[in-house]
Amino acid sequence: MSLIVHKGYLPGSIGRVVDLHARFYSDLVDFGLPFETKVARELSEFCERYDDNCDGFWLLLQDGIVEGSIAIDGSKANQNGAHLRWFITSDKLRGTGAGTALLTAAMDFCQSHQYRCVYLCTFDGLGAARHLYEKFGFRLVHQQQGKQWGSEVSEQRFERNAS
């Protein structure tokens, strides 16, 4: 089993990242069509306007298959902070350190670009992910009930500020 963190788009990667999100969150919290189309639309838009000077997109490859992803959208970093998005690993790689490898690549990128604030939006109930976020210096700054992903959850915003 060879794991590689690849920077940048690969053919088929948009569909695979959407698939990973759709299946995981459908099983976990019953997110359905609205969530899957939102992920597909926003990830596609991000890839179309991707700018190496401010954005980062990493894929976790196992034997050439996309088994995870993470992105940094830096297009509004000066105003709102850099946005960490589409962080996921496949079921078979959870708990193996794969998520740590992806977060390390993304946070190293943010540090090299001197992003003073990095934020992410998630929801309550993702204990392993929250543990990783906190390990990397993210702190919960806001929480409210919401339906932006298709089902009502306790939405959360985490931030990491440069010291």
Image: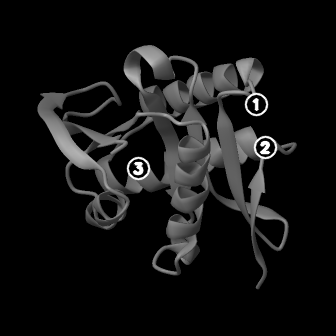
Residue situated in front as seen by the camera: 136 or 5: 136
Instruction: State which quarter of the image contains the C terminus.
Output: top left
Question: With respect to residue 109, does 104 lie above or below?
Answer: below
Q: CA distance from mark 3 to mark 1?
A: 29 Å
Q: Return the x and y of residue 134 as percentages of the image width and height.
A: 28, 59
Residue 71, labelled with which disc?
none
Dot 2 corresponds to which residue? Answer: 8
Nearer the observer: mark 2 or 1; the answer is 1
The amino acid at mark 1 is Asp
Q: Return the x and y of residue 105 as percentages of the image width and height.
A: 61, 56
Instruction: State which quarter of the image contains the N terminus.
Output: bottom right
- The mark that comes first in sequence, 2 or 1, is 2
Name the outermost residue toward the left: 144
Looking at the rendered structure, the secondary structure element under dot 3 is helix
Dot 3 corresponds to which residue? Answer: 25
Question: With respect to residue 17, does 104 lie above or below?
Answer: below
Dot 1 corresponds to which residue? Answer: 52
Q: Residue at x 34, y 56 (%)?
A: 28
Looking at the rendered structure, the secondary structure element under dot 2 is loop
* Category of crowding for the residue at label 2, using alpha-carbon neighbours closer than 10 angstroms: few (below 14), some (14–19), many (at least 20): some
